[in-house]
Amino acid sequence: MKLKAAKKALELIKDGMVVGLGSGTTAKLFIEELGKIVREGYDILAIPSSFDSHLLAVENGIPLTDLFQHPEVDIYIDGADQVDKDFNLIKGGGAALTREKILAYASKKFYVIVDETKLTEKLSMPIPIEVLPFAYGFVKRKIEEMGFQCELREAKGKLKPVISDNGNFIADVYAGVIENPKKLEKELKIVGVIENGIFPSEIVDGVIVGRKDTAEIILNY
């Protein structure tokens, strides 16, 4: 289903575009598919959102650029951990949420590629946050005062904390079912929090959903 979504996303790519590359398992499939059309002759420049996607793009022969040279990106393709019925997202399972959100805002179009299991009525997953290490104790206290739980992330084979590509802590906020994602996204902009993993619907142009037999583009009007 993920591969079907990744291949469907290629229909949005035109020769000469600057393309933002997401991170994670579904984005990985898209990067590999993008590499195929670059080898076929497409003139594409890409801006990766993480070291992982950077290395993968290099392996697949995709020419790279950055926001210094191209401060406006034509299209950004990335996955998501959850997508609600109103096109709000939770992202950051791969710890690249800050760069991902920057690319989402810097792009003319932002499309999310997911398999159908990522669709939900309301967001309910833990919300990733990137925190300046110096501020973590303060941030944790403020989040607990909001009535939520905040825990440093621990990776497989690595004790806490997980460190982002920017050198900061990654933590997860347990807020339960999120009734108002846009409100909570603003409330989590605590001093010391670099960024949080709620992506509001107004920056999402569409969701590409991979299903067992097909993939469809659902536009956010």
Image (spheres, rainbow, N blue to C red):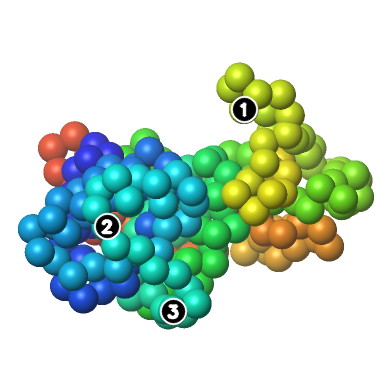
Tell me: 49 left or right of 151: left
Residue 119 visible, this angle: no
Q: Secondary structure at mark 1?
A: loop
Image position, residue 144 (x, y; %)? 86, 43
Q: Which residue is mark 3?
A: 69
Q: Which mark is residue 155?
A: 1
Q: Residue at x 48, y 73 (%)?
A: 67
Image position, residue 135 (x, y; %)? 87, 52
Q: Nearer the viewer, residue 103 or 143?
A: 103
* Residue 4 to residue 65: above or below: above
The kind of residue on which mark 2 rests is Ile
Mark 3: give few (<14), some (14-19) or many (20+) Cα within 10 Å: few
Q: Residue at x 58, y 39 (%)?
A: 125
Q: Which mark is residue 15?
A: none
Q: Which residue is mark 2?
A: 62
Q: Secondary structure at mark 3?
A: loop
Query: Which quadrant of the figure contains the N terminus?
Result: top left
| Pointer 2 or 3: first along the chain | 2
| Pointer 3 or 1: first along the chain | 3
Q: Nearer the viewer, residue 118 or 92?
A: 92
The kind of residue on which mark 1 rests is Ala
Q: CB atoms at circles 2 and 3 under 8 Å apart? A: no
Q: Nearer the viewer, residue 155 or 45?
A: 45
Q: Nearer the viewer, residue 69 or 30?
A: 69
Q: Residue at x 54, y 40 (%)?
A: 93
Residue extending furthest left?
A: 40
Tell me: 134 left or right of 66: right
| Disc 1 versus disc 2: nearer the observer | 2
